[in-house]
Image (cartoon, rainbow, N blue to C red):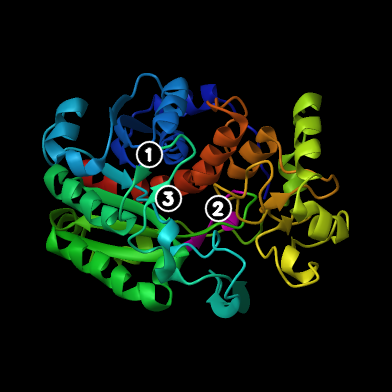
Amino acid sequence: MTYKPYTLKDVYDASAQEKFKVISTFAGGGGSSTGYRLAGGKVLVINEFVEEAQKTYAENYPETVILPGDIKELTGENFLDAAGVYEGEIDILDGSPPCSAFSVAGKLSHNVHEEERIDLFGNVTVEKVAGKHSDGWGQTKNYSDGKMVENIEDLFFEFLRVANDIKPKVIVAENVKGLTIGEAKEYFNKILNEFGNIGYEVCAQVLDSRYFGVSQTRTRVIFIGVRHDVMAKLGLNFMTISQIFPKPDADVIPVKDVMIDLVYDPEEVKYLTDKFTNTAYWKYTGSKMPIDPDKVLTGADYHPKGHHFNLKRVSQYQPSPTITAMGSADTTAGAFHWTEPRKLTLGELKRIMSLPDDFKLTGKWNQKAERCGRMVPPRMMERIASAIYTNVLEKYNG
């Protein structure tokens, strides 16, 4: 499996095919939208709450209509009018409702425990996770530009409310894997039931981006809901809907393979080195972690009291650990360089997230890094969208 860097021109060239029409909610800076475009889709309208994310999106895709603000204040009619289409005509409605209350990647270094995982090939492993899912439920979510949204766990149902108005042929939603674990399962089951209530058969699978052309271990639960009349026409049922999902690769891409020919800014490297080497993360933990490891290292294994669980030293011989919104900042715990005492540059983050090399990020440095950490990897979404087009939309629309 190889990785080929690409540019926004490649994205626009692919999108010019206009194979299918997309509306995207909780669009962030445009990660999932980039994936839909790479698969040949045209993104007509997006909604995004965070102003800096809106700016990033507009910098890269100025032709797309942006509906700003809280989705709770929008209706499906708002989206349809902005897109210039009627109810039922949109091919894909996409959404990534905020998910930190259910995340296992972003928790603090307390309540560390082990949970069993089964990967895409049926292999069972035991993984250390930190935090308790319910700690964040009903809490406000703060963003780097000062905006916040309350009770983020109800936003999935706001997304489905809008879906019921738009009635797309297919609904695609992305969320953290923590949604399927432990006490969060009740919430997960409510989501599945609501898909049925609005007229969709749904299948949810946990996918890991490292098996879909991305040099990063990033596990997400992907929901694909197909409208009942589309299911009937194609002869699909609840037993066969899982066949819509893309097939995973057998091989993964190591970090070193995505860094080939990457151009570095010496001032950015110095800035990140100066920042990180003055943190407790480096002093007490990072400085004790071996250089150029053959596997990803976890800070808790090197801190004298087992702290800094979320500090990860990247191995250039493996996919990167998960890039998180907070963990990508210049002085926080998160992924840091395999040989140098610094956090990852924006160029490195973009390659690991599978973004175009010339993708524009707006705001201050930490806001730019946060945008990367919150995105859906485009190459993964390209694979999902291509599978949906081949297995559903091409057959139904043809």
In the shown orientation, is residue 364 left or right of residue 154? right
Q: Is residue 263 above or below residue 213?
A: above
The magenta span reads: 207-214
Instruction: Work out whether mark 2 precedes mark 3 in sequence or the reverse, and give the earlier one.
Output: 2
Residue at the image point whose x is 39% and y is 38% from the top:
147
- Find numbered disc 2 in the image and state the secondary structure of the residue it sits on: loop
Q: Are marks 2 and 3 in contact (CB under 8 Å)?
A: yes
Residue 93 coordinates in the image, percent (x, y): 27, 44
In the shown orientation, is residue 80 left or right of residue 285? left
Q: Is residue 173 above or below residue 347?
A: below
Q: Is residue 385 above or below residue 251?
A: above
Q: Nearer the viewer, residue 56 or 80?
A: 56
- Find numbered disc 3 in the image and state the secondary structure of the residue it sits on: helix
Residue 244 coordinates in the image, percent (x, y): 36, 58
| Residue type at numbered disc 3 | Ile
Image disc number at residue 27: 1
Q: Is residue 398 visible?
A: no
Q: Is residue 209 magenta?
A: yes
- Measure the C-alpha gap from mark 2 to mark 3: 9 Å
Residue identified by numbered label 2: 212
Q: Is residue 265 magenta?
A: no
Image disc number at residue 161: none
Give the number of the mark in front: 1 or 2: 1
Residue at the image point whose x is 34% and y is 53% from the top:
173
Residue 351 coordinates in the image, percent (x, y): 65, 39
| Residue type at numbered disc 2 | Phe
Residue identified by numbered label 3: 384
Q: Nearer the viewer, residue 349 or 257?
A: 349
Residue at the image point whose x is 39% and y is 24% from the top:
16
Q: Nearer the viewer, residue 319 or 333?
A: 333
